[in-house]
Image (spheres, helix red, strand yellow):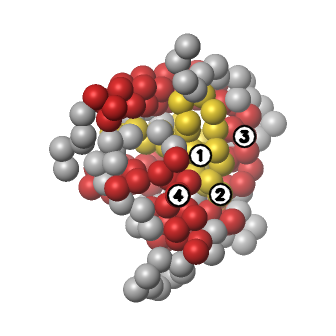
Amino acid sequence: MQEDLRVAVVVGSTREGRVGGDVGGWFVRCAAARAGVVVDVVDLAEFAIPVCYPAAPTEAMARFARRIAAAEAYVVVTPEYNRSFPASLKQAIDCAYDEWRAKPVGFVSYGYRAAGRYAVEQLRGVFTELHTATVRDAVCLDLLEFDSTNTDRYAHAVSTLLDELVWWGLALRDGRRARPYCA
Ligand SMILES: Cc1cc2nc3c(=O)[nH]c(=O)nc-3n(C[C@H](O)[C@H](O)[C@H](O)COP(=O)(O)O)c2cc1C
């Protein structure tokens, strides 16, 4: 029998009064029914990642990197801040390097008007540098319409994201086991 794919859901906002916790929880509830996947919620609000990058990793940075290393695929939950993603998310992403490598990344974004799509497009460049495969379809939530108690409305988008993530996750698991990644 195939091992469950270990998916880390990274909740990117640490803002006081954030809605990111609700959005992350909503996505995990939507994804829970998915067979073959086991989810680890990596909530950045639980990691005191330093604003100034230190000479040596802090305990929080090392703990974050270990959780990233343990996962085989990622879903990054991001708001849009000034047409990009929040600094808290970039500071965390930069705490790991090899740990991300040769694994897929999907996105759940939220905001107004563009529903966080600008944040997603900027994150794709960051994750290319980290040798990940970003999946095509994202779940993009307009906060004017979003209801965290409704898991039906975006069911198709969630399912499409997970279909792509799981395909890449299993393919890259096999690939990493078959041969070392080239970089
Ligand atoms: C500094 C800042 C900049 C923002 N810029 C945008 C933006 O460019 N586009 C957008 O749709 N929403 C923008 N927003 C609204 C956020 O998407 C919205 O407040 C969301 O709830 C933020 O996520 P959070 O509550 O989880 O931190 C911005 C919010 C903040 C705090």
Pointer 4 local density, CA inside 10 Å: few below 14, some 14–19, many at least 20: few
Dot 1 corresponds to which residue?
Answer: 9
Q: CA distance from mark 2 to mark 3?
A: 13 Å
**Mark 2 or mark 3, whichever is nearer to me:** 2
Dot 4 corresponds to which residue?
Answer: 66
Q: Is residue 135 left or right of residue 145?
A: left
Which residue shows up at 62% across the image and 63% down it? Answer: 44
**Image spot of residue 157 (x, y percent):** 55, 27
Determine whether label 2 and label 3 are within 8 Å by CB: no
Of callouts 2 and 3, the N-terminal one: 3
Q: CA distance from mark 3 to mark 4?
A: 25 Å
Which residue shows up at 52% across the image and 18% down it? Answer: 2
Q: CA distance from mark 1 to mark 4?
A: 14 Å
The amino acid type, in three-letter code, at marker 3 is Trp
**Mark 1 or mark 4, whichever is nearer to me:** 4
Which residue shows up at 56% across the image and 54% down it? Answer: 67
